[in-house]
Image (tube, helix red, strand yellow):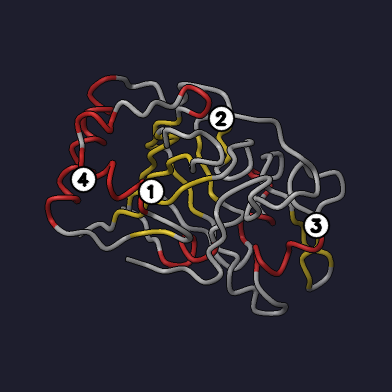
C-alpha cells in the first residue's frame, strides 16, 4: 500500500517544492522524506502557522520517480530547474554559483557527506496539484481528522496514520483531483532568498534532523 506523508512548510518560495514545466520536484530540504518515500507514495504539504495562521494546503503530489546518488544534479534535462542548485566538480558536488536557494553551507544537509551523498535522493511528480499562495484551509471544515493532525504536527513529518485519518487524506486528494485537472493553481507564496536555508523558520520547512515520525 502506498504511504502518505505530510508535513508543514514555514515558507514556500519555489525551491522546496519546485514546480516547473509540469514537473514537481522535492530536491532540497526534507532529507528524511526524500530518503524514505518511494514511487507511488503521496506527499501532502501544508503551511505552518508562521507562514499562514490557518494552515492552508499548499500541494499534494504522487511520487513518480526517485533519482538517487545525485543523478538529478548531473542530468542535463534538470539543469535549468530552480532547485538544481548543486553540480559535480571532479568527484564532489558543490553549490552552483548564482543558485537562488541555499548556499555552500547547506550541501551536507541536502546531499549528505562526500563520497556517499546518502541524502541526495530527489522526489519527482507529474501527478500533482500545487496551490502555493492560493492555498486554502477550507479542508478543515470537512475533514476534522486532518485538521487536528495538521494543527498538532510539530517538527518533521507524519506517515503513520490510522484508517480513519488515511481515509480522510485519500478523500481530500480525490476531491481536489475531481475538481480540477490543472496542476499549478497558484504562484509560490514568496520569492526566494539566496543563501537562506529552507529548513530554517525564516525561509522554509520545519527542520527534520530530529524527525518525530508519527
Q: Nearer the viewer, residue 145 or 29?
A: 145
Question: First in sequence: mark 4 or mark 1?
Answer: 1
Which residue in the structure is indicated by mark 2?
Answer: 21
Q: In this view, does 129 lie to the left or right of 101?
A: left
Quarter occupied by the N terminus: bottom left
Which residue in the structure is indicated by mark 3?
Answer: 95
Question: First in sequence: mark 2 or mark 4?
Answer: 2
Q: Position of residue 140 (x, y in %)?
A: 27, 33
Measured Cα–Cα span from mark 4 to mark 1: 17 Å
SS state under label 2: loop
Question: First in sequence: mark 2 or mark 3?
Answer: 2
Q: Which of 177 and 145 is in front in this view?
A: 145
Quarter occupied by the C terminus: bottom left
User: What residue sits 46% from the left and 48% below the top?
Assistant: 8
SS state under label 4: helix
Q: Position of residue 100 (x, y in %)?
A: 77, 41
Which residue in the structure is indicated by mark 4?
Answer: 145
Do callouts 4 and 1 mark residues in contact (Cβ within 8 Å)? no
Do callouts 2 and 1 mark residues in contact (Cβ within 8 Å)? no
User: What residue sits 51% from the left and 29% below the top?
Assistant: 132
Measured Cα–Cα span from mark 2 to mark 4: 34 Å
Measured Cα–Cα span from mark 2 to mark 1: 19 Å
Which residue in the structure is indicated by mark 1?
Answer: 43
Q: Where is residue 58 in the image (x, y as percent from the top left)?
A: 45, 34
Q: Looking at the picture, does residue 12 appear above or below residue 32?
A: above
Amino acid at each position: 500500500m502506498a504511504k502518505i506523508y505530510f508535513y508543514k512548510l514555514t515558507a514556500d518560495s519555489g525551491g522546496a517544492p519546485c514546480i516547473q514545466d509540469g514537473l514537481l520536484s522535492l530536491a532540497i530540504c526534507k532529507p528524511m522524506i526524500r530518503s524514505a518515500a518511494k514511487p507511488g507514495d503521496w506527499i501532502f504539504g501544508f503551511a505552518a502557522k508562521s507562514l499562514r495562521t490557518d494552515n492552508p494546503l499548499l500541494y499534494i503530489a504522487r511520487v513518480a520517480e526517485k533519482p538517487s546518488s545525485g543523478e538529478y544534479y548531473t542530468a542535463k534535462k534538470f539543469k535549468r530547474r530552480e532547485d538544481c542548485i548543486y553540480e559535480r566538480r571532479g568527484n564532489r558536488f558543490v553549490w552552483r554559483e548564482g543558485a537562488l536557494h541555499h548556499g555552500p553551507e547547506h550541501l551536507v544537509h541536502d546531499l549528505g557527506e562526500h563520497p556517499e551523498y546518502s541524502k541526495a535522493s530527489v522526489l519527482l511528480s507529474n501527478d500533482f496539484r500545487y496551490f502555493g499562495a492560493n492555498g486554502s484551509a477550507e479542508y478543515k471544515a470537512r475533514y476534522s481528522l486532518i485538521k487536528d493532525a495538521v494543527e498538532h504536527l510539530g517538527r518533521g513529518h507524519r506517515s503513520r496514520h490510522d484508517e480513519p485519518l488515511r481515509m480522510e487524506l485519500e478523500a481530500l486528494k480525490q476531491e481536489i483531483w475531481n475538481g480540477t485537472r490543472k496542476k499549478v493553481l497558484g504562484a509560490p507564496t514568496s520569492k526566494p532568498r539566496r543563501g537562506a536555508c529552507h529548513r530554517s523558520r525564516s525561509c522554509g520547512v520545519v527542520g527534520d534532523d530530529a524527525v518525530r515520525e508519527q
